[in-house]
Image: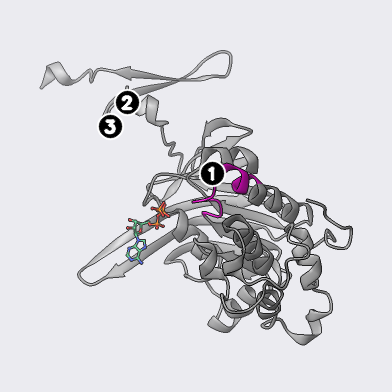
Amino acid sequence: MTVTETAARAEVGIGVTCRGLVYIYRLEGYDVVALSGVDLDIEPGESVALLGPSGSGKSTLLSLLAGLLRPAAGRLHVGEHDVARATPAELAVMRSTDVGVMLQGAMRNLLPYVSATENIHFAQSGVAPARRDALMTPDELLDLVGLAGKGRQRPPDLAPGERQRLAVACAVANGAGLLLADEPTSQLDTHARDQVLDVLAEVRRTGRTVVVVTHDPDVGLRMGRTVTIRDGRVGAEGRRGEEYSVVGRDGAVHLPPDVLAEVAPGTLLRVELTDEGAVRLVPTDDPTKEDR
Ligand SMILES: Nc1ncnc2c1ncn2[C@@H]1O[C@H](COP(=O)(O)OP(=O)(O)OP(=O)(O)O)[C@@H](O)[C@H]1O
């Protein structure tokens, strides 16, 4: 896959700040708390994989970052936008110019009856005329995602991995500084998956910030930084394949699953700071048990 210098020209990455982010789905008769206090900083130009069990809140977090949902509580800044306080019109501007979104399933992001080039033109149609000259051209974008020469093909004529790469081109076609992708590699074979990951790396090299939701730990490894969402909060972070617990603003720490298997919920833990600066958790019997 070759990338021309023009295609790789720099964009400005957009950073994200979440503080105590809460989201609640209000259903008839009951509420579902999908996010219960997410604290997360993503630097401009960083690439991050959101991992976690099914139902932990990854897609909800992605939708909040995309300005598709509004937080019930907490603060969320996407670049200069205060998402919790923005008017619907401001959120619409944010979505059309600053954020590129790839929904799960390539065809949900593409128009099937028009060519790849026309898909990109359509993705750029919401951008204000004054900004359009600064956008990458469809040919540059096709080159960026390794589809040079395929501009006349329609999405159904492309291979699944090629469709997903076209969806990447369409998502960033508006000049977005933040790319958000929900499961961009699911249902692809290893070769096609690696090509999509190469393209996401190219997108990052243009300066953009890239955030993907994935169930695939290998995708997490390739992204460099992983953030594991558990029960609607940041449970752990990974750097270059190494997993770390994260101390929350309230001092809470999610224990990793293998430790939790040893110390059941409700266990008393003595927290000791050793002379070497390590923190030791010592399961302890309740000393008042015999008094009862
Ligand atoms: N539209 C909705 N209405 C009601 N509840 C929802 C809705 N979407 C998600 N939820 C609930 O919110 C919680 C978080 O869901 P979310 O889809 O964000 O998790 P996820 O980690 O992305 O899951 P998966 O990996 O299965 O896609 C779950 O309990 C889910 O059932």
Residue, far front: 157
| Residue 122 showing in the rendered view | yes
* Mark 2 vs mark 1, CA separation in Å: 21 Å
Q: Secondary structure at mark 3?
A: loop
The answer to whether marks 3 and 1 mark residues whose Cβ atoms lie closer than 8 Å is no
Identified at 57% across, 36% down, the residue is: 238
Q: Check residue 265 in the rendering and tell me which mark sits there, or answer none.
A: 3
Image quadrant where one finds the C terminus: top left
Q: Does any atom of ligand 1 lie closer than 8 Å to the CB of label 3?
A: no
* Most foreground residue, 240 or 113: 113
Identified at 48% across, 52% down, the residue is: 38
Say which quarter of the image contains residue 210. bottom right
Does residue 178 appear left or right of residue 182 in this picture? right
Split into quadrants, the picture shows ligand 1 in the one at bottom left
Q: Secondary structure at mark 1?
A: strand
Residue 273: x and y in percent read: 50, 19
**The disc labelled 1 sits on which kind of residue?**
Val
Say which quarter of the image contains residue 255. top left
Q: Earlier in the sequence, mark 3 or mark 1?
A: 1
| 3 or 1: mark nearer the eye | 1
**The disc labelled 3 sits on which kind of residue?**
Pro
Q: Secondary structure at mark 2?
A: loop
Q: Check residue 227 in the rendering and tell me which mark sits there, or answer none.
A: 1
Q: Check residue 261 in the rendering and tell me which mark sits there, or answer none.
A: 2
Which residues, given as a range, are shown in magenta?
183-194
